[in-house]
Amino acid sequence: MAQLVVSKFGGTSMGDAECMLRSAEVSHRQGSSLIAVSATSGTTNDLIALGKTAESQPWPEAEKIITKILDKHEKIARDLAISSHSQERLEILFEEMNSLAKGVHLLRDCSVKAMDTLMSLGERMSSVLFTEAMAKVLQKYNSKKTAELFDVRTVLRTDDSFGKAKPLTSEIAKLCSENLGFLRDHKKVVVTQGYIGMTDEGMTTTLGRGGSDYSAAILAEGVSADVLEIWTDVAGIATTDPRLCSKAKPISEISFKEASELATFGAKVLHPATLLPAIRKNIPVFVGSSFDAEAKGTWVRKDVEDHPLIRAMALRKKQVLVTLSTPEMLHAHGFLFQIFKVFNDHKVSIDAITTSEISVSVTLDDSTLVNKKLISDLSQFADVQVEDNLALISLIGNNINHTAGLGKHIFEAISDINVRMICLGASKHNFCFLVSEEQGPETIRRLHETFIEAGPEEMG
Ligand code: ASP
Ligand code: MG
């Protein structure tokens, strides 16, 4: 039986009619049955700007943004010579955008709830257009399959945390089997929206910026796909960000565990949550470039052939180090519990932690500190010190916590760079530490040279 392939195409792969046709060719070649697409590149940002402008500026300013969004989508529609049926669908969406923006403007209030519905239009519009591109390509190859548009909100049930809604896995599985069971017949190519979902009450939600990868993974889990493909504008996952280090190399295969660490610790290629559903259902994930069909891309799966000590490295900027100290921690218990409860109450996610007898340091993304209340709540339990402008450097690989001499090589390579905090031991796959943001790129370049370009022979 043919494999069930779920694919995702990102915003740049939806950039214009040419990009859409190229992406549709890729889907056809790969035999995708379910395709989740992002909004056309830049559109989600434009929709956010529209919401904010409609809320606070004179109406003509909002109108300018509406015109920009309309022009872009109408041009793609013309270039693809879309059917009248799709044209009508598109116009209904344009009308909805206009009404929503008007509503926001009249109320002078763009709530997160309203913003989610507004943002959902990006994916809803691009999916109408991509269905047409897909139909054209199927026709070109005389395929018997038909392209069909599907509203993902029928199956992608979420909670009501607008702006970053949580998918409800078991409900999604049930809805997928009720509504998408026909995929295994391989008669249709279903095009749907990434990034968006719906609550039980029928309110539109979004999964958080860059969430289309995650949507595709959730869908792959929901329909028990054999393969999940993430098509983007780079040829898979690299040993480090090529913008930081020109010697970065493509990775052909990486394990789920390593790739999850890499995505969480700063590699921009995959949304950090993407791998969770794939891991739960053991679905191999391919990451490739829709622009470069020749490039090999990266396979992410449970079992891989080689297990290098260091496979990749990542840099995560804008980190803050929060150090909490109190003499009361001496020989006491419950201190960490109290502190972590505060982070939990504020829904702030901690990345790395180190402790001493009377203090504990944690790293956070600096955006989370916009919330000043977090610091005042923590101050009830300890002295709080906040340092910012830091970068978290992570080395990702295998057997990291059991390899003698690794630390020596790392710190020799960066002996003149001050290391602010180190985390080692909790994971076989990750060694991370903080340096100043300014020295982050240089740190990556030196470590890449040591571990990837040269590779210390005496280790591993
Ligand atoms: N369109 C959404 C964004 O730009 C989701 C995505 O592209 O993955 O964040
Ligand atoms: Mg995107």
Image (spheres, rainbow, N blue to C red):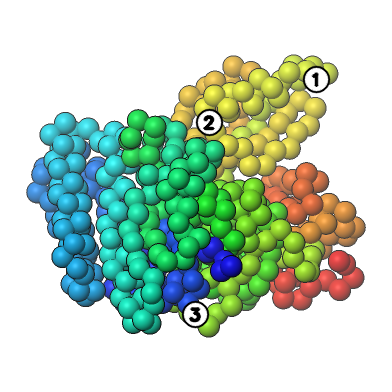
On the rendered structure, is 454 left or right of 147?
Answer: right
Pointer 2: residues within 10 angstroms few (<14), some, or many (20+)?
Answer: few
Q: Position of residue 263 (x, y in %)?
A: 59, 55
Q: Position of residue 387 (x, y in %)?
A: 58, 39
The amino acid type found where label 2 is placed reads Lys
Q: Position of residue 139 (x, y in %)?
A: 32, 78
Check residue 197 in the rendering and tell me which mark sits there, or answer none: none
Q: Residue at x 59, y 77 (%)?
A: 296
Task: Mark 1 or mark 3: name the one nearer the start of the chain.
Answer: 3
Total labels: the figure holds: 3
Pointer 3: residues within 10 angstroms few (<14), some, or many (20+)?
Answer: some
Report which quarter residue 441 is drawn in: bottom right
Q: Nearer the viewer, residue 54 or 192?
A: 192
| Distance CA(mark 2)–CA(mark 3) | 41 Å
| Distance CA(mark 2)–CA(mark 1) | 27 Å
Comparing labels 1 and 3, the label whose residue is closer to the camera: 3
Task: Mark 2 or mark 3: name the one nearer the start of the chain.
Answer: 3
On the rendered structure, is 124 left or right of 231?
Answer: left
| Circle 1: element type | loop
Above or below, comparing residue 435 to residue 1 in the picture:
above
Check if mark 1's residue and mark 3's residue have beta carbons within 8 Å: no
Check residue 330 in the rendering and tell me which mark sits there, or answer none: 1
Query: Which residue corresponds to mark 3?
Result: 293
| Distance CA(mark 1)–CA(mark 3) | 60 Å
On the rendered structure, is 91 left or right of 144?
Answer: left
The amino acid type found where label 3 is placed reads Ala
The amino acid type found where label 1 is placed reads Leu
Task: Mark 2 or mark 1: name the one nearer the start of the chain.
Answer: 1
Res 265 visible? no
Above or below, comparing residue 408 to residue 353 in the picture:
below
Query: Which residue corresponds to mark 2?
Result: 347
Q: Nearer the viewer, residue 87 or 330?
A: 87
